[in-house]
Amino acid sequence: MLGVISGDYGKPRPAVVVQSNLYKNHPSITVCPLTTNLIDAPTFRLLLTPTELKESHIMVDKISAIRSDKIQKKLVNYHLNN
């Protein structure tokens, strides 16, 4: 899932949820925020091919857990089947 979370400075930021659906009723969600400030750090910043969004990097180095009620909006619903 790609959702919008509150940013550090009050600005909403898109994020990729990186948590199993087994924990969907848990009060927190593990996310990786996105940035359009592209830098050359392929180990920590993964390119997200855009659809409706600008070209972005997934900031793996900024992974964090947030409260579920802080998800403002679901942008894209995408699941990996493993």
Image: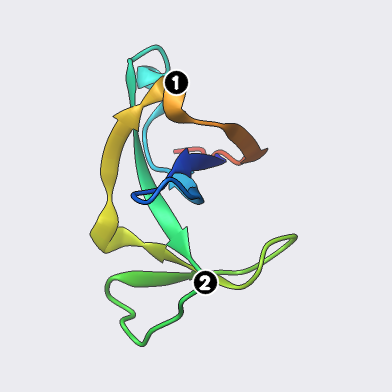
Which mark, by number, is residue 24?
A: none
- Give the x, y percent position of residue 51: 73, 62
The Cα–Cα distance between marks 1 and 2, rounded to whole angstroms, is 25 Å
Label 1 belongs to which residue? 69
* Extreme residue in the top direction: 25
Q: Quadrant of the N terminus?
A: top right
Quadrant of the image containing the C terminus:
top left
Picture coordinates of residue 25, whole percent (x, y): 40, 12
Q: Where is residue 46 in the image (x, y as percent from the top left)?
A: 41, 70
Q: Note whether 28 is above or below 74 in the view shown.
A: above
| Image-based side of 3 in relation to 38, left or right | right
What amino acid is at disc 1? Asp
Q: Quadrant of residue 43?
A: bottom left
Give SS at disc 1. Answer: helix
> Label 2 is placed on what type of residue?
Thr
Location of mark 2 (residue):
36
The answer to whether 68 is drawn above or below residue 62 in the figure is above
Q: Earlier in the sequence, mark 1 or mark 2?
A: 2
Q: Name the residue: 75% across, 60% down.
A: 52
Query: Left or right: where does residue 6 sit relative to residue 76?
Result: left
| Residue found 38% across the figure and 42% down from its top | 18
Which residue is located at x 28 percent, y 70 percent?
44
Crowding at dot 2, Cα within 10 Å, few <14 / some 14-19 / many 20+, comes out as few
- Which of the 4 quarters of the picture holds residue 69? top left
Q: Which of 49 and 7 is in front in this view?
A: 7
Seen at 44% across and 28% down, the residue is 70
Q: Residue furthest right?
A: 52
